[in-house]
Image: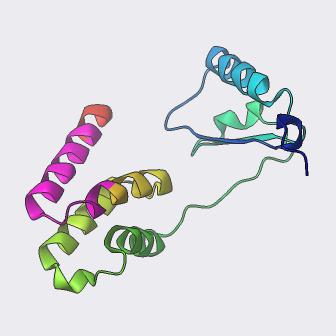
């Protein structure tokens, strides 16, 4: 089996937090197309909670995913944060994890990033700092 770029596919997944303007989309799309120029059947997946990005896609009708339930998100976040560790053995961390999960607004990418941070240090002070940072970040962007 040949090992050349022509034989490999590339998948680019972009999860947008905010809106995307036409100029920004053109830059992103152009860059991705250059990366995928020699790779046939490569794809770009663009996700956002707004329907405004539908105009940039080529799939018709656009695929629409429903939000994951709060309960399912909490289970996912708890599982990837605590791993094989029993969360009941760390009640203060469990409480902090619940607060952090609420702050993440059911974002799976944010859940993965924060779970990696938390998993590295099972310390109440550290998790409290992460929670404070996230709360401050949310306040800064809401107001």
Q: Position of residue 56 (x, y in %)?
A: 75, 30
Q: Is residue 92 left or right of residue 40?
A: left
Q: State the residue at coordinates (76%, 52%).
A: 63
| Residue 43 location, quadrant | top right
Q: Is residue 126 left or right of residue 16?
A: left
Give the answer, above or below, for where 51 lies relative to 25: below
Report the label total: 0
Give the answer, above or below, for where 91 lies relative to 27: below
Q: Position of residue 115 (x, y in %)?
A: 35, 60
| Residue 2 location, quadrant | top right
Q: How is the image coloured?
A: rainbow
Q: State the residue at coordinates (31%, 33%).
A: 141
Magenta part of the protein: which range?
A: 117-138
Is the C terminus in the top left, top right, bottom left or bottom right quadrant?
top left
Q: State the residue at coordinates (59%, 41%).
A: 50
Q: Position of residue 25 (x, y in %)?
A: 67, 22
Q: State the residue at coordinates (20%, 53%).
A: 131
- Given residues 55 and 97, the one toward you in this image is 97
Instruction: Give the farthest residue toward the left.
Output: 125
Q: Position of residue 45 (x, y in %)?
A: 71, 43
- Given residues 38 and 98, the one toward you in this image is 38
User: Is 137 part of what is drawn in magenta?
Assistant: yes
Give the answer, above or below, for where 56 lies relative to 101: above
| Residue 29 location, quadrant | top right
Q: Main secondary structure of the magenta part?
A: helix
């Amino acid at each position: 089996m040949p090992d050349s770029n022509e034989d490999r596919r590339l998948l680019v997944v972009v999860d947008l937090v905010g809106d995307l303007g036409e100029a920004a989309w053109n830059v992103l799309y152009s860059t991705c197309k250059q990366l995928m120029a020699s790779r046939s059947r490569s794809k770009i997946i663009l996700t956002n909670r707004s329907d405004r990005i539908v105009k940039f896609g080529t799939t018709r009708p656009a695929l629409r995913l429903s939000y994951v339930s709060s309960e399912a998100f909490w289970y996912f976040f708890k599982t990837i944060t605590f791993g094989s560790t029993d969360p009941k053995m760390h009640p203060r961390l469990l409480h902090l994890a619940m607060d952090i999960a609420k702050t993440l607004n059911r974002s799976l990418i944010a859940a993965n990033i924060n779970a990696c941070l938390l998993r590295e240090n099972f310390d109440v002070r550290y998790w409290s700092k992460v929670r404070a940072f996230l709360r401050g970040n949310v306040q800064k962007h809401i107001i």
